[in-house]
Amino acid sequence: MNASFDTIIIGAGSMGSSAAYFLSKTGQKVLCLDRYPAPHVFGSHGGQSRIVRKAYFEHPDYVPLLERSYQNWRILEEESGQKLYYKTGLIYLSSAQSEISKGVKHAARIHDLSLIDLDTESLNDKYSQFKSTQNKQILLEKEAGFVLPELTIQTLIKLSGNYGAIFRMPEIVQSWKVSGGVCSVTTNMGIYLSEKLIICPGAWSSQLLPDLNIPLKVSRQNLAWFETSSSSNFSMESFPCFMIDDDNHGLFYGFPELEPEKFGGSGGLKIAHHLVSDYVENLMEYSPDNKISQEEESLLRNILSTFLPEANGRLLNASTCLYTNSPDGDFVLDFLPGYHEKVIVACGFSGHGFKFVPVIGEILSDLTRKGKTDLNIDFLRLSRFA
Ligand SMILES: Cc1cc2nc3c(=O)[nH]c(=O)nc-3n(C[C@H](O)[C@H](O)[C@H](O)COP(=O)(O)OP(=O)(O)OC[C@H]3O[C@@H](n4cnc5c(N)ncnc54)[C@H](O)[C@@H]3O)c2cc1C
């Protein structure tokens, strides 16, 4: 096959499927290629749920992007008739000196976001599941919640298809080039031509973007689901998402228990450790599995037994997923230098990109069609590494 498109998107995962939706909605002829049939478990979007929050400790400049993302989540739900976002609230639990809680408060203050300071008593009144919270800094972000990543990608692919986007998967992109003003993409099945190219291959970014010249380190991350003493006590109607910053071991985060009948999976409370340490040097040797080391399990149990003892039951399920870590933990979103704004990259989402899916897709569409975006992405551009 040798066909021509307005835009080819490499990677139909989180960011690629969203770009396909926004571009095809404007009438562009779009081809989206993925090495696996998305959604899938081999990249960064598997594992049932993703936290969405706005008081962004990572960098306050993300907040305006999140405001747009929240709007776009709603539009996506309305257009598809599919519920994707569940507002549960989010409890941040840490010591008073925690840099994370300082960052959460700072972002909330400068962007005038609602954030409630709770004491142990008022936390107990609302969520008696949390224990050992004396002398802790407790913050509640009421507007936060979680989204369903696999269903989001399915929905984006379906809507894009309705607007005429073509998805070819599984099909592996082997190389790409720009010559004579035309982009050409070679896969294991053919060559495709386009006016513009978006490259968002997640964990495979270094392979497809050797000119990027910034180290993107891929790490393997574990997720685990533990049985609770009472599913109704930990359901999303009675329990929030949470982030616990432990002085010794760093950040842990988790979700309410989701009914398997409605959401699939094993049930149980999902918890994970946001620690980047298990680097994947060779992606060919990585395969996702449903195991978790004894050491990791005991770290998770240590947090559960201290703060959520009624959720420290049997290990029901585990899975692995990949982070693609940029050197500073911030996303990489820009034109690739040297290609006259024909090639746009979106990568290095560093384990916190999913909540931005509907705004990144819009930005990619704007950069592709208009060469600019109204949103401030200067802090995400490649020039920061110069
Ligand atoms: C365990 C875990 C927990 C997370 N929790 C949260 C959270 O709570 N909140 C949050 O906001 N974010 C969270 N994230 C981060 C978020 O999920 C990622 O930032 C986001 O999914 C990255 O999207 P992506 O498009 O870069 O990658 P992907 O969704 O993996 O998409 C990349 C796609 O490119 C395809 N591809 C690669 N190479 C090729 C090729 N050669 N040819 C064709 N296709 C190719 C891949 O198959 C893949 O489908 C979490 C991530 C993990 C792993």
Image (cartoon, rainbow, N blue to C red):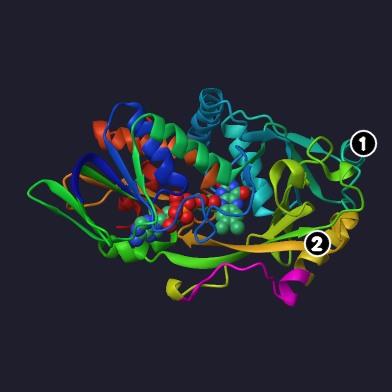
| Kind of residue at badge 2 | Ile
Task: Name the residue located 25 percent from the left edge and 62 percent from the top edge.
Answer: 211
293 is within the stretch colored magenta: yes
Q: Position of residue 256 (x, y in %)?
A: 77, 45
- Looking at the picture, how far across and down is residue 365, in whole percent? 33, 35
Position of 215 with respect to 103 (left or right) is left
In screen coordinates, is 254 left or right of 338? Answer: right
Task: Name which residue type carries label 1.
Answer: Asp
- Crowding near the residue tagged with mark 1, few <14, some 14–19, many ≥20 C-alpha atoms within 10 Å: few
Residue 172, quarter of the rendered image: bottom left
Please tell me whether residue 275 is drawn above or below residue 134 in the rendered image.
below
- Nearer to the camera, 75 or 371: 75
Q: Give the range drawn in magenta.
A: 285-297
Question: Can the viewer see residue 348 in this picture?
Answer: no
Camera sees residue 33: yes
- Secondary element under disc 2, as helix, strand or loop, is helix
Q: For mark 2, what is the residue?
A: 303
| Residue 272 drawn above or below residue 155 | below
Residue underneath mark 1: 125
Residue 14: image x %, image y %?
Answer: 47, 46
Q: Nearer the viewer, residue 326 or 295?
A: 295
Residue at the far front: name it: 1
User: Looking at the image, which residue is at 37% across and 38% down?
Assistant: 20
Quarter of the image for residue 46 reads bottom right
Please report the residue visible at 29 percent of the width from the left and 60 percent of the height from the top: 212
